[in-house]
Image: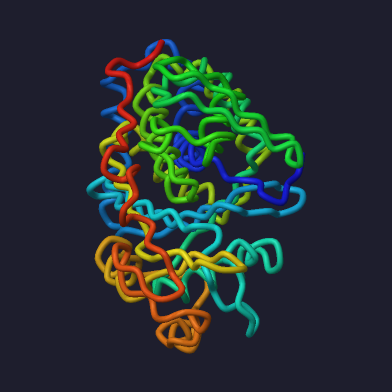
């Protein structure tokens, strides 16, 4: 498979983030012979035990990266903020083509991790968005299909027939319209789909060829995954899932921190997660860039991505470079997501997929 355009599957990110938090408690329960008696009461007891630890902590940011573990590709990045008191999770997907300045040169943001590891990735995102990042998580996408299959698939509403073939990547997507349970391979097809072999009026209601619309579909998939699979009936499969995750994840979370977080797993559901789009526009030219509206993005991060501690201290100079117009020297300064300027094109204006797009999911969890 061509790994140049390898992706991070958002589901893996969230499942890793939440499931890892539950490892210690689940193993403790099983080791103590309590696995058969696990109930809502035991969950409440666990929450009561860890509640004092969590209430003393403020919200924190996690940079979630993903791609191929061997080659360190990271074509998808997300900034995740978790508040352990309110159980609220804010997620901002960072388009992989976002224009940044790395080592005095203009690059796409997915250049950072393969060329400087998590340190450079954290520094780049922190400088762009003016946020502290306390933790990082890198998840290998090889785990995605295995986890979906272990959990019996995910019921998803495929909004239109999806047909796309790219022999150079050995990527073939063929899904029929309708509500159906997708296995690991089909789920991969769904979250990777961006544009079809042939455009139709129906497909244009949901997609426009941009990575932003694919991100929206991934977010919908994540919500359905959590709603359907984060239930007690899947606890018997937790050991297999844990093995898959530990083989495909790198993080600076400590075991002690995982133990403290584990008491909150039962408090998190699809409604706890708020997905936020990064303001910006796309550059009409070569190379193709996504231009972050730095001012508006930082307004969002200042209120929704609060974090008092940082994995790596970021110098002011790293932040100031993104407030200068030279970061967008190939075009005029980015203003908003709905107003085009010379050299840019809006990702929302006159786009039929934005007014009609609605990937409504099934009403009852799949067994």
Q: What residue lies at 24% left-to-right and 65% top-to-bottom?
A: 303
Give the quarter of the image for residue 270: top left
Mark count: 0
| Residue at image point 33% right, 55% down | 348
Q: Is residue 198 above or below residue 139?
A: above
Nearer the observer, 315 or 127: 127
182 or 337, which lies in front? 337
- Could you say where residue 62 lies in the image, as x and y percent from the top left? 45, 57
Residue 9: image x %, image y %? 54, 40
Image position of 117 (left or right of 41): right
Q: Which of 341/106 is in front?
A: 341
Q: Which residue is drawn at 55% across and 35% down?
A: 196
Residue 1 horizontal side relative to residue 240, left or right: right
Q: How is the image coloured?
A: rainbow
Q: Quadrant of the N terminus?
A: top right
Residue drawn at the location 71% of the way across and 47% of the way down: 69
Where is the C terminus found, in terms of image quarters? Answer: top left
In this rendering, is residue 328 above or below 354?
below
Where residue 250 sits in the image (x, y, percent)?
A: 63, 50
Up/down of 148 relative to 259, above or below: above
Relative to 309, say whether 25 is above or below.
Answer: above
Image location (x, y in percent) of residue 68 = 70, 46
């Amino acid at each position: 498979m061509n790994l140049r355009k390898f992706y991070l599957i958002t589901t893996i990110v969230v499942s890793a983030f939440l499931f890892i938090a539950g490892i210690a408690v689940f193993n403790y329960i099983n080791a103590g012979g309590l696995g058969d008696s696990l109930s809502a009461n035991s969950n409440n007891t666990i929450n009561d035990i860890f509640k004092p630890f969590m209430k003393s902590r403020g919200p924190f940011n996690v940079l979630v990266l993903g791609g191929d573990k061997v080659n360190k590709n990271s074509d998808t990045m997300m900034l995740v903020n978790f508040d352990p008191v309110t159980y609220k999770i804010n997620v901002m997907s960072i388009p992989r083509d976002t224009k940044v300045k790395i080592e005095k040169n203009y690059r796409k943001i997915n250049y950072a991790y393969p060329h400087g590891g998590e340190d450079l990735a954290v520094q780049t995102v922190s400088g762009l968005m003016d946020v502290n990042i306390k933790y990082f998580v890198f998840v290998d996408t090889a785990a995605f299909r295995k986890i979906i299959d272990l959990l019996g698939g995910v019921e998803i509403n495929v909004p239109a027939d999806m047909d796309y073939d790219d022999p150079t990547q050995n990527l073939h997507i063929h899904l029929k319209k309708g509500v159906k349970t997708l296995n690991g391979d089909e789920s991969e097809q769904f979250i990777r789909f961006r544009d079809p072999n042939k455009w139709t009026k129906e497909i244009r209601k949901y997609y426009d060829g941009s990575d932003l619309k694919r991100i929206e579909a991934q977010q919908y998939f994540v919500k359905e995954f959590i709603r359907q699979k984060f239930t007690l009936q899947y606890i018997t499969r937790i050991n297999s899932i844990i093995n898959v995750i530990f083989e495909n994840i790198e993080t600076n979370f400590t075991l002690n921190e995982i133990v403290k977080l584990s008491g909150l797993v039962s408090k998190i559901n699809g409604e706890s997660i708020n997905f936020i789009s990064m303001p910006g526009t796309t550059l009409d030219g070569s190379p193709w860039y996504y231009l972050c509206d730095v001012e508006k993005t930082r307004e969002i991060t200042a209120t929704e991505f609060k974090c008092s501690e940082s994995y790596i201290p970021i110098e002011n100079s790293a932040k100031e470079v993104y407030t200068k117009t030279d970061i967008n020297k190939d075009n005029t300064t980015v203003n908003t997501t709905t107003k085009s300027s010379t050299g840019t094109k809006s990702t929302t204006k006159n786009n039929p997929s934005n007014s009609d797009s609605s990937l409504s999911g099934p009403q009852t969890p799949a067994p």
